[in-house]
């Protein structure tokens, strides 16, 4: 039986990164629903993120998205990092953006035009400059590149162009910096996406070296994909760099992680724990948009959902499971896993929070804090995350 004290100690070390864009207005390509009180600046996004960390105790870093979080001035990013630090936060992954410019209609780093490729590469290199200023470890790369029609461009040549750009970025990485390559099986390209799956991302990262790691965005798979298998495999190969957590019913829905399928999240976290991935070497990030629900409480709820899945994964009785597996007792093995999944871990997490000196009920504590009312009063004309613009 796993010692509860060890489970609690592990939960206290958990770190979940929240995305700056989740605090801003967002929507679908049909409509952005503006909410009162949303942040108008990167600094205000950090103010909100500080509330999430204050109430959960496990959300100490915030991912930035460039240019959505662009700040001016030679020392702008260093000052933003200081602003974060003064609020008990650190800046996390820098997300690049080579998908919202007319020039990228036929692709960014895989575009047939060398001038467009150069422009995209310059942006990625600028993101590494920003990492130097913010002290961020990770550069996250998601490419919308791909083609809509068979024959539109040469699939192999596009892979060569991608490899060339990735190699140039890799060369530029400093000590302690990494690049995280994210895959997505479709959208916005519909015929062939240039980084559609973990295998493509893995092949590029393997060639580049150990500073290149794969990101698993839980929303970026075809329905029915066994994501925990991918997690187990990447961890086994030392190539799992990070998660982008969210939930999906149909496609890239970006709903609250653990909302659509908490059992899947548990299975993923079990493979993380089993594979030794519950360490700072794997970044646990949210990549979500809150279009119709209030943003800060939705992010708090998401963090709690990841915590609950983690607690259940840590509670799996490894010895009993191994014994059942080696004796071929299928039902007993499955029961060990399900016992952990069916445990109500909310009282355990409430105790963990009390031991950390925070309120055992983060949702209620936030509701009582008055922050939601304060930002509605003080902030007028909040910004859009960047989606649906
Ligand atoms: C687009 O699918 C996406 O959601 C990717 O998951 C990126 O991580 C994110 O946008 C931010 O660029
Ligand atoms: Mn993502
Ligand atoms: Mn996505």
Image: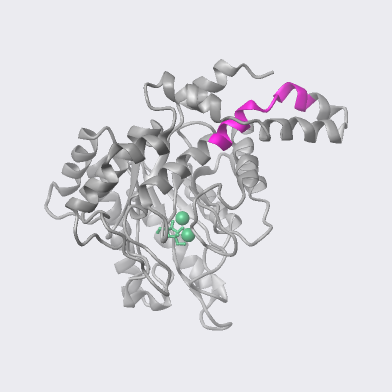
Q: Residue placed at 37% from the left, 74% from the top?
A: 104
Q: Give the main secondary structure of the magenta stretch.
A: helix
Judge whether residue 9 can be spotted in this image.
Answer: yes
With 110 as the anchor, is 343 left or right in this view?
right
Q: Quadrant of the N terminus?
A: top right
Q: Quadrant of residue 280?
A: top left
Judge whether residue 170 can be spotted in this image.
Answer: no
The residue nearer to you, when weighing 376 against 106, is 376
Q: Residue placed at 52% from the left, 41% from the top?
A: 305
The residue nearer to you, when weighing 353 against 372, is 372
- The reply to whether the magenta stretch includes residue 317 is yes
Q: Position of residue 273 (x, y in %)?
A: 60, 32
- Relative height, residue 168 to residue 16 (above, below): below
- Relative height, residue 185 to residue 189 (above, below): above
Ligand 1 found in image quarter:
bottom left
Q: Which residues are magenta?
A: 308-322
């Amino acid at each position: 039986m796993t010692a509860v004290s060890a489970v609690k100690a592990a939960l206290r070390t958990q770190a979940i990164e929240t995305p700056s864009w989740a605090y801003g207005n967002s929507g679908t390509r049909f409509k952005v629903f503006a909410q009162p009180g949303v942040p108008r600046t990167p600094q205000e996004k950090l103010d909100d993120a500080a509330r999430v960390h204050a109430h959960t105790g496990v959300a100490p870093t915030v991912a930035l998205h460039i240019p959505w979080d662009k700040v001016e001035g030679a020392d702008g990013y260093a000052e933003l990092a200081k602003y974060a630090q003064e609020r008990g936060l650190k800046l996390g992954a820098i997300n690049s953006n080579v998908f919202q410019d007319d020039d990228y209609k036929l692709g960014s780093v895989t575009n047939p035009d060398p001038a467009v490729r150069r422009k995209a590469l310059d942006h990625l290199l600028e993101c590494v400059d920003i990492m130097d200023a913010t002290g961020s470890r990770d550069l996250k790369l998601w490419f919308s590149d791909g083609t809509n029609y068979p024959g539109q461009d040469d699939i192999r040549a596009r892979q060569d162009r991608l490899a060339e750009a990735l190699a140039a970025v890799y060369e530029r990485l400093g000590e302690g910096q990494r690049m995280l390559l994210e895959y997505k099986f479709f959208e916005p390209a519909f015929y062939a996406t240039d980084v559609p799956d973990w295998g493509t991302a893995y092949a590029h990262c393997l060639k580049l070296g150990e500073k290149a790691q794969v990101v698993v965005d839980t929303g970026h798979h075809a329905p029915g994909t066994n994501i925990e298998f991918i997690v187990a495999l990447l961890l086994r190969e030392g190539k799992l760099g990070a998660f982008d957590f969210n939930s999906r019913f149909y496609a890239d829905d970006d709903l609250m992680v653990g909302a659509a399928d908490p059992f899947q999240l548990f299975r993923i976290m079990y493979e993380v724990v089993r594979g030794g991935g519950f360490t700072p070497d794997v970044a646990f990030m949210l990549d979500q948009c809150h279009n119709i629900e209030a943003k800060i409480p939705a992010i708090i709820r998401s963090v709690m959902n990841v915590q609950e899945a983690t607690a259940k994964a840590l509670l799996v009785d490894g010895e009993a499971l191994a014994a059942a597996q080696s004796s071929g007792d299928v039902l007993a093995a499955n029961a060990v896993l399900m016992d952990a999944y069916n445990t109500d871990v909310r009282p355990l997490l409430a105790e963990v929070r009390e031991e950390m000196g925070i309120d055992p009920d983060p949702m209620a504590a936030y509701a009582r804090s008055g922050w939601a009312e304060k930002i509605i009063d003080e902030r007028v004309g909040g910004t859009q995350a960047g989606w649906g613009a």
